[in-house]
Amino acid sequence: MDTGTHVVMGIAIGGLATLDPVVSSSPAMTQAVMVGAIVGSQAPDFDTILKLKNNATYIRNHRGVTHSVPAWFIWPTLITLFLWTLMPNINVFHLWLWTFLAVFIHVFVDIFNAYGTKAFAPFKKKWIALGIINIFDPFIFIAHIIAILFWRFGTEPGVTFLTLYGINIIYYGWRIRAQRNVYHELKSRHPDATHIFTSPTFRWNLWHCVVRTREKMYVAESRHHQINYFETYPFEPIPDDPIINAARKDDNLSSFLSFSPAYRWEVTEEPHGYSVKFVDLRYRSKGYYPFIAIVRLDENKNILSSYTGWIFNTEALQRKLEFAPESS
């Protein structure tokens, strides 16, 4: 989920914690748990700092180690120890439990996005991306804001946020059912499909879809329960081509391939030599594929520059490549 949603989720967990008598009986404990829940709800995304290095490092590692099973326990332990040094009289065990819940819920809700996370690493290193809830879901965010406002104007926080979570559980159940309906419709049309990827949007009745069989890939959408097809591509492994092989040594392209399960590529001759471009088919928007990786090489297949990330127009891409150093 986005940062704003994680923040309001942290506040909600802090309010829910008042149902715990150990928390509600002590103002210091209530304050410590609220701080722990808010920080814990953000902690797994502290790896966002990797953007300061480059997009390749960020894409390869974001939602990886910081969301893994060991991190579920490391984050609340570090946060609890820090707060305990500031407030030594608090109940460490109950603070740890509520902070752990905040960290766990962060990781749990991220699984439902199309981006996904390595939530079960190191035991299972595969990305888990259910493609059910958008990165920013207006219903979830607004529901949390309304609950916080109810608390602000006098309702009992424990009951208020317990009700909120009950509503969210129902909402998640409905979204899971909606996604499964899309999945089963596509599976009925393509019984030979090996992979079906769904990406939710801001609109409840609109889903971006990619169907992969052993021979083809279909880019489509489900709009108001109707499947609309856009492009069909042959499915084939990345060829053993000297130009592509040289490009694959680049960190940006390597990071893209470690993340994207459904893509197309092209090699073009340019005045500087060659350009190798990969596009992720899952995020088609207005006829355009904005999540890309591109590597520019000279005539001797030496990497000149590269980029991976979100690009929505060719001018922006050109600027990125002009100022992008060779990745190492």
Image (cartoon, rainbow, N blue to C red):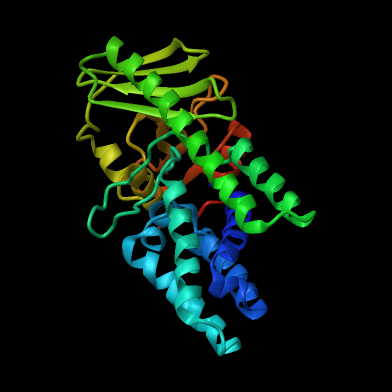
Query: On the rendered structure, is 264 left or right of 93?
Result: left
| Residue situated in front as seen by the camera: 43 or 255 | 43
Image location of residue 54, percent across then percent down: 49, 57
Q: Residue at x 53, y 43 (%)?
A: 166
Residue 207 rendering spot, x and y as whole percentages: 48, 23
Say whether residue 85 is left or right of residue 149.
left
The answer to whether 280 is drawn above or below residue 253 in the figure is above
Q: Position of residue 112 (x, y in %)?
A: 43, 41
- 245 or 119: nearer the viewer: 119
Q: Position of residue 328 (x, y in %)?
A: 39, 59
- Residue at 60% x, 31% y is 313
Residue 85 seen: yes
At 45% across and 66% down in the image, what residue appears?
Answer: 100
Does 202 appear above or below 121?
Answer: above
Total number of numbered labels? 0
Reply above or below: 147 against 82. Answer: above
Q: Is residue 301 visible?
A: no
**In percent of the image, x 39 and y 64: which residue is there?**
72
Please state if 303 lies on the left or on the right of 224 as rendered.
left
Residue 161 position (above or below residue 30): above
**Residue at the extreme right:** 153
Q: Nearer the viewer, residue 136 or 27?
A: 27
Q: Work out whether residue 262 or residue 123 is closer to the camera in this orientation and state it.
A: 123
| Residue 17 found in image quarter | bottom right
Quarter of the image for residue 14 reads bottom right
